[in-house]
Image (cartoon, rainbow, N blue to C red):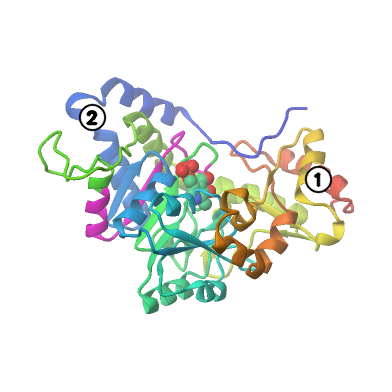
Amino acid sequence: MARIPVAGPWITQKEIDYVADATAHAWYGNANMYHDRFETAFSHYIGTEYAMALPSCTSAIHLSLLALGVGKEDEVIVPDLTWIATSAPVTYVGATPVFSDCDEKTWCISSDSLQECITPRTKAIIPVDLYGNLPEMDAIRDIAQDKDIAVIEDAAEAIGSEYHGRRAGSFGDVGVFSFHGSKTMTTGEGGMLVTDRRDLYDRCLTLRDHGRASGEKMFWNAEVGYKYKMSSMQAALGLAQLERIDELVDRKRQIFSWYRQNLESVEEVTLNCEHPGTKNSYWMVTAIFDAEFGLLKEEIIRKMREKEIDLWPFFYPLSSQPAYSAFASACDAQRRNVVSYRVSPYGVNLPCGMNMTVECVRRVCDVVREVVGIGESS
Ligand SMILES: Cc1ncc(COP(=O)(O)O)c(C=O)c1O
């Protein structure tokens, strides 16, 4: 039986044609034609004024922090449960990450914990739309506005999710996306920064072009910046994927619905939530197993692998990781973030690549039941 991977894209002839066209024609005076089309279409889709294609979401977070003036002496609040790409750029700019606890249902940053983490040094918050789930955006925005703190919405995993009719990524001063090969839409590697703020957009344009302001003479650099650009071939791939975004998100939702039908009657398994008024694009179908099964995620993953099915572990709390062992803020978080430490050990991402079929989902669920010792599916 073929091994079932966790994630992977859906590439059609359209993507192949666009990339071939970029390879043949996006040079000389047309060098930016696919960037322009991709960025315009993307800002339109998200509902923001500006969009900037970048080599990764990590670089988008880095630029956002720099453009917001975050630096030494500042603190940036991030959820404890996320990929380290959310917090690593905080260190790049010399600031301190502060790890907030997550909400029991959405697994995203909890607004109560966020409040507790705020100090006079807090300069920004990076809420993450984890696995496509959405945090309490209204509460987060109110807190941020009240305390004059910037918001960078990390929507790396949530293209196509919606919160009361607005698209994920449009809630902060800046929103950022990832197009890594595992994501709902991909450019191989790649990212996008979106914003309504002209000042931040202009600053990011300069910073990502080795410190050369747009319109400035060639090879003339006002400051030392970065080289954060996407290639035309990636932009062409991204444009083709974006033109199929409804189909891609529908497929993700369909895969999730197959899992839900199969597992929803099992009380001891909790899947991603979708609160009223929100739409979840379910980048990762995620299951939290009741601690009473007595199986940690690593054990479940090992047993499933023996049956040719790959799973990923739920993110480990950042504050538990060696990367942050020397950070006092991680020590505080280990004591404070009880939900993160309760959820993470028992969570896994189930296979939900774009190539999943209803039969594959049934096979995964059958093996899951066998491995953790749940009764037969109905
Ligand atoms: C929540 C989150 N933030 C940021 C990133 C970084 O994205 P990239 O790999 O494009 O830099 C990822 C990537 O997986 C992510 O899941």
Check disc 2 and give the amino acid type. Ala
N-terminal of the two: label 1 or label 2? Answer: 2
141 magenta-colored: no
Point out which mark residue 299 bears. 1
Whether label 2 lies within 8 Å of ligand 1 gets the answer: no
Q: Quadrant of the N terminus?
A: top right
Point out which mark residue 64 bears. none
Q: Nearer the viewer, residue 6 or 331?
A: 331
In the image, residue 266 lies at what x, y percent?
81, 59
Q: Label 2 crowding class (10 Å Cα cut-off): few <14, some 14-19, many 20+?
A: some
Q: For the point 47% across and 53% down, which residue is it?
A: 160
The span picked out in magenta is 183-204
Do labels 1 and 2 touch, CB within 8 Å? no
Q: Nearer the viewer, residue 372 or 101?
A: 101
Q: For the point 26% across and 40% down, which residue is it?
A: 36
Q: Nearer the viewer, residue 372 or 335?
A: 335
In the image, residue 361 lies at what x, y percent?
72, 43
Q: Is residue 128 visible?
A: yes
Q: Residue furthest left?
A: 217
Of marks 1 and 2, the one in the foreground: 1
Residue 372 is left or right of residue 73, and the answer is: right
Instruction: Please give the residue where the numbered disc 2 appears in the rendered image.
Output: 31
SS assignment at label 1: helix
Q: Nearer the viewer, residue 76 or 197?
A: 76
